[in-house]
Amino acid sequence: MLFTPQLDDSSRIPHYVQIYEQMKRQMIAGTLSEHTKLPSVRKLADLLGLSTTPVETAYQQLIAEGFIASKPKSGYYVQPLAEQQVDRGGERERKSTVARLQHRDTSSYPYVFYLSRNDFSQFPFALWRRLFNRVLRHEYQELLFYGDPQGEYGLRRELARYLHQLRGVSCSPGQIVIGADQYGLLSLLALLLKARVARVGVENPGYPLIASIFRQNGYEVVPVSLEEDGLNVNELADSGVQLVAVSPSHQYPRGMIMPIAKRLRLLEWAKKTDAYLIEDDYDGEFRYHGRPVPSLQGLAEGTNVIHMGGFSQVLAPAFCVYYMALPESLLASYDLLLRELLLEQSASPLHQKTLELLMREGHFEKHVRRMRNVYRKKHDTLVQAVRKHMGERAVLIGEDAGFHVLLKVEHHLEEKGAFADGKKGRNQCRLGCLYLDAASPGRGCKRISPGLCRD
Amino acid sequence: MLFTPQLDDSSRIPHYVQIYEQMKRQMIAGTLSEHTKLPSVRKLADLLGLSTTPVETAYQQLIAEGFIASKPKSGYYVQPLAEQQVDRGGERERKSTVARLQHRDTSSYPYVFYLSRNDFSQFPFALWRRLFNRVLRHEYQELLFYGDPQGEYGLRRELARYLHQLRGVSCSPGQIVIGADQYGLLSLLALLLKARVARVGVENPGYPLIASIFRQNGYEVVPVSLEEDGLNVNELADSGVQLVAVSPSHQYPRGMIMPIAKRLRLLEWAKKTDAYLIEDDYDGEFRYHGRPVPSLQGLAEGTNVIHMGGFSQVLAPAFCVYYMALPESLLASYDLLLRELLLEQSASPLHQKTLELLMREGHFEKHVRRMRNVYRKKHDTLVQAVRKHMGERAVLIGEDAGFHVLLKVEHHLEEKGAFADGKKGRNQCRLGCLYLDAASPGRGCKRISPGLCRD
């Protein structure tokens, strides 16, 4: 007996879908068994009181999915299936997810000592909307396509100018590479340097992402300890690394600013050993008393400094735009790598274009100045509050720049077991903290950068 | 004799900057030599006719940068510099970039056979602007911060629903991971699977990015050949791989759709050998005659299928939003990896939120239907044009889906050396091509996907 689908004319599901689904279900269930000959298109259409089109379409779909086959001059046949493999409950409910840990669930803390918390109260919402609305238009529909894999030229040009003026970086737009995150840019760098570098030095303590990415990419990673004024250059020279990553503007996490003499020794080491330097300038814009410290990259011509930065602290993380300025010696390899991997740009060209307008029309630098004031006030309030409430029991380290300071808590607090993780008395404290509960240091300290005590 | 800066009162540069810059220049030039004692703050202020504030600020900046040091109860002293390292032309012009190759310079081709060229004429510009303007507001300023590193929950929820309805994918929002590009998601996957997998199978020919990322991450990559209906499963079984990447909805680049019987054999192999499957569903939405083929992932419960897709073809590349649905067996490792690397989300939370609204309010599915019609018409026009102008001299392969077809050109053209790269007669042809110059096949073929002939 021929199988005839039951059509529901009141349903909004098209006839061809109903036919296709019922037949498929029968075949998976085995009630329409393999090698069964199906009715011809015309015959089934007659049976169902339909035109041939929906039946034809359903059959074509079943052919495309391999459920049936058409034998020339013979008809349509059900194909053999390894049916035990089919999920008979094809429409089963999606399972609830396994219990997942919440990332950054900070709702239960009265003061969140998040390490790099932006203040968005001064963000130029209306201006950004206006600029974005200028960018996303039918006339500029090309912007919806894949952008330049290196980053939009217009933004790279503005960045080269800005970095020169505000950070003392000396590079052309052609040296700038844009990406959506530090992970992507550092991975690219790890690929670029593979032929030249085997051992990588990192600050100890330092930003953990850099070490882990190079380690994943097969490099040997050598921690180099810090002195009061930054990286221990003697230890670096002895380590035999060919690349070192530093954060001279505001060391992460210790917060010191590397003095010029040490910068020059570092550059001298790099020149002498033909080594590469990664300058992580993650919050170089925010120095609160005095001008931002100029970059390592601009200090000496022709050294292999890779200057890295981004817009997450200076503007907002949500635009996902980061950049690096490659030394000219790496540009040819970079071009080759782009071609070999056929990489696409990961930072949205729409955000890049909006950012370009923001910079070109002078709004961006105004915003940086405004935010430096906002953060300076918060920074100063924090510093005063710590001094007032904790007095000599705590020492602030690495103040005067960026989004975090280090709080060294005195010995007698440690002895009382004030620290949740039992480690020695260092902890990171978010800028913007207005109050530290000096009366119950245990609780106060637990609130400080929960889960981020790495030092 | 004491060095006294020359101030320009008509300049817009603040006094403290002028003091700082002149002193710094003198120190770098060596005219203010090391160990020189500087005038006290009060003395220099008097000499310059200023309050002490600008002098104090300039000195603090010079201290921060390590040019000078303050000795308690003594005064300020110029520090030793490795001066030969200093770039004396600190203000030098940024160099012009080296001549760079242009990526995707397609302006010189009358017809651009780009492999995945979107048509943006139907893009809902006004609607997207309206939704974006709803998202980027002071009230929602939290959206400017780092988003959920796994991707915004709202978008993941909409995606789980959409993938279930349109692609037959069975997953919860908790299984979906969002990222800005395929490179990032595949890199993450390569890290996730490292403990379980050593050998990876890839389609040959196939999407080159998958092979190169796994190779970079230290995997052995095994090419597995294709049959007329997709991957050779016998060869796969013999290869000893524990992971294979396939594009069953529309093989890249050959274009075939994997029939159900082969899908089930593939799933059976994965289950039997406890292997993983990557299902690359890059253009699964666009099947032109009949319904989209349901995903491999939804066919069998509990197998280790990683379903990957993105919005670049179905909407626009410029939003940089891609996703993968992980099998539940990988979720615990994924959580660990997130915590270990402290990874941030690379796809803009603002675009993610806008996309969520687009999907939740039903606009997205309407757009997909509209675009399927647009591309179907182009596809049909192309197919007809090839048949009309090339007749039996060319065979179309992998038609009826996606953004590309394969054009197999007959033997006599090859013999004439019609192909720029001298390879055998396969080439990829962009959907939307309306005309192939049959009279001068050499030129015609050179125009076909320049630089992308990989088969």
Image: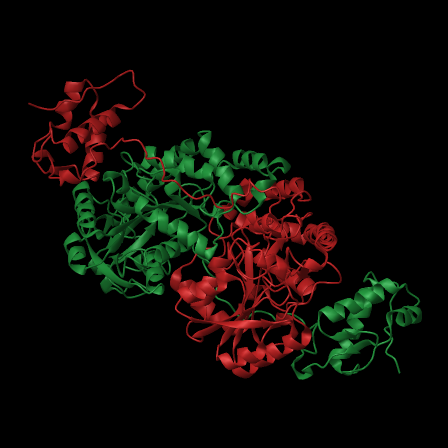
Chain colours: A green, B red
Is A129 drawn above or below residue A181 in the view shown?
above
What residue is shown at x 42% (from left), y 35% (from top)?
A158
Residue A431 visible (yes or no) = no
Give x and y (percent) for residue A422: 28, 66
Is B311 drawn above or below residue A37 in the view shown?
above
Q: Could you tell whether A420 is left or right of B277 in the image?
A: left
Give x and y (percent) for residue A279: 29, 47
Q: Could you tell whether B311 is left or right of A431 in the image?
A: right
In depth, the one of A381 and A172 nearer the eye is: A172
Q: Quadrant of residue A365?
A: top left
Q: Could you tell whether A231 is left or right of B308 in the image?
A: left
Give x and y (percent) for residue B190: 45, 67
Q: Could you tell whether B243 is left or right of A426 in the image?
A: right
Is B3 drawn above or below residue A346 in the view shown?
above
Please state, as top left, top right, bottom left or bottom right, where the C terminus of chain A lies in the image: bottom left
In depth, the one of B296 and B265 nearer the eye is: B265
Give x and y (percent) for residue A123: 48, 38
Is A316 drawn above or below residue A184 in the view shown?
above
Please state, as top left, top right, bottom left or bottom right, where the N terminus of chain A lies in the image: bottom right
